[in-house]
Image: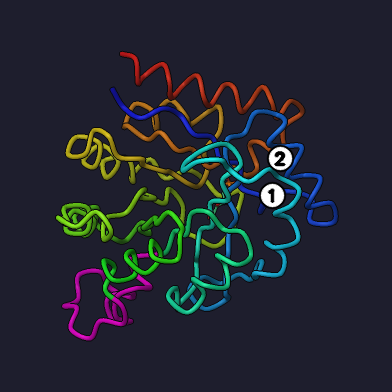
Amino acid sequence: MAPKAIIAPSILSADFADLGAECSRTIAQGADWLHVDIMDAHFVPNLTFGPPVVAKIRPHVDRPTESFAKGTFDCHMMIAEPKKWVKEFKAAGCDLYCFHYEAAIDSTAAESPEAPRTEQKTSPRELIRYIHEQGMLAGIAIKPATKAEVLFEVLDSGDVKERPDMVLVMTVEPGFGGQKFMASELPKVQALRARYPDLNIEVDGGLGPGTIDQAADAGANVIVAGSAVFGAKDPAGVISLLREAVDKRGKL
Ligand SMILES: O=C(CO)[C@@H](O)[C@H](O)COP(=O)(O)O
């Protein structure tokens, strides 16, 4: 049976003037996690929150009592230097530090996933080990131009400390909320689910009532939704619809 649904609204679509209250309200509306999009204007063409903002909103949500529990701060690190910020985000209250594969490897490969990777900045496995040593869960994300196969080597690591706790398959180009869902990315989710039945597979970008069935059919269980939740008249209803769509498939 596939892992259970985890619904992680992206606070990129929240009211930034009322961010603490938006976070606690969203958890009360039934969200499991909060997805916190960290952007540095280098890795992606947008700029969002740093550690002080995460530290300010953290007390508005009860800390998770165990790994993957309600209240997890799922920090999606769309930054060029993911290793540099691990300790700061841990101190700020991040529970799951999800870096981009493309940022961890060399810059040539980031521009073209087909290019040979000779000069590694940080090996994804080393970075995962480091994140675990700092006491956080580790996630690894891929952009639309990156093949799912690059994750196999990391996921197949014999050492559990170097294996990610979650993978994130982007279903839009990272950088902005409110973009159109890219169904072209779902074969990656299918391939990952077929190979790793127990893996937590997150999808992010354009998810909502109109696209959740496709993502759930492909095997995604961690669902990020920004505009679909924060823009809804009934956010609790949307969160529960997303959860039911995923859990229904897990039981098939
Ligand atoms: O990481 C990102 C964008 O880069 C996302 O988390 C978006 O914030 C999702 O927003 P919607 O597509 O759900 O509106």
| Tag of residue 230 | 2
* Quadrant in the picture for the C terminus: top left
Residue at position x 74%, y 55% in the image: 57
Q: List x then y, in percent, for residue 55.
A: 70, 63
Residue at position x 65%, y 28% in the image: 30
Q: List x then y, in percent, for residue 23.
A: 73, 45
Element under label 1? helix
Q: Which of 175 and 155 is in front in this view?
A: 155
Element under label 2? helix
**Residue beneath disc 1:** 13
Circles 1 and 2, Cβ within 8 Å, touching? The answer is: yes
Instruction: Categorize mark 1 by other alpha carbons within 10 Å: few (<14), some (14-19), many (20+).
Output: some
Residue 6's place in the image compared with 205, above or below, is above
Q: Nearer the viewer, residue 45 or 48?
A: 48
Span of residues in magenta: 100-122
The yes-or-no answer for disc 2 within 8 Å of ligand 1 is no
**Residue 115 inside the magenta-drawn segment:** yes
**Residue 242 inside the magenta-drawn segment:** no
